Image (cartoon, rainbow, N blue to C red):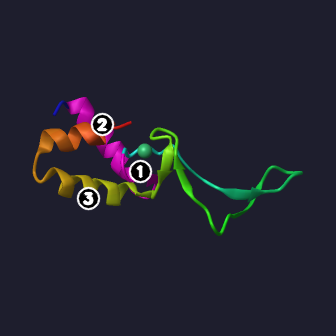
Amino acid sequence: MSKSYMIIEEAKDKDLDDMWVCDYCGTEEVDEKAWVNMNTGMITEPDDYTNYWCNCCNDEVSPISYFEFKEKIAEECGGNKEKYHQILDGSRM
Ligand SMILES: [Zn+2]
């Protein structure tokens, strides 16, 4: 792992762990449906029956936190570090 890569990873750890990401590809480009005030454009509340959408997969997904995503991928890769880092780098996006 190169040094610059490690710095990026460290920065990610600080900012991203609490962010929602796609449970398959890991992008933060995930949307949920919400009610939006027609006059202000502000979100009033999330839709109770929302489906979540990944703009990379172009499909409905079940977003999880980035922290959970890393755990999930680690489990999926079963110790294959190269595969793990490829997926975290966005090989599925
Ligand atoms: Zn996705």
Q: Which of the two discs, 2 and 1, labels the residue nearer the N terminus? A: 1
The residue wearing badge 2 is 89
Query: In which quadrant is the C terminus drawn?
Result: top left
Residue displayed at 52% across by 40% down: 55
- Report how far apart the C-alphas of labels 3 and 1 lie in the structure: 14 Å
> What amino acid does circle 1 point to?
Leu
Picture layout, residue 13 above or below residue 87: below
The residue wearing badge 1 is 16
What secondary structure characterizes most of the magenta part?
helix
Residue displayed at 37% across by 44% down: 25
Q: Which mark is residue 71?
A: 3
Q: Which residues are magenta?
A: 3-24
Q: Are marks 2 and 3 in contact (CB under 8 Å)?
A: no
| Left or right, residue 29 beside residue 35 | left
Q: Which of the two discs, 2 and 3, labels the residue nearer the N terminus? A: 3
Percent from the top left, x then y, of residue 35? 75, 59
**In front of the other: 73 or 60:** 60
Q: Secondary structure at mark 1?
A: helix
Number of the front mark, 3 or 1: 3
Local crowd size for mark 3, using a 10 Å CA cut-off: few (<14), some (14–19), many (≥20): few
Q: From the Cβ of disc 1, is ligand 1 less than 8 Å away?
A: no
Query: In which quadrant is the N terminus drawn?
Result: top left
> What amino acid does circle 2 point to?
Asp
- Report how far apart the C-alphas of labels 2 and 3 lie in the structure: 15 Å
**Where on the image, by quarter, is ligand 1?**
top left
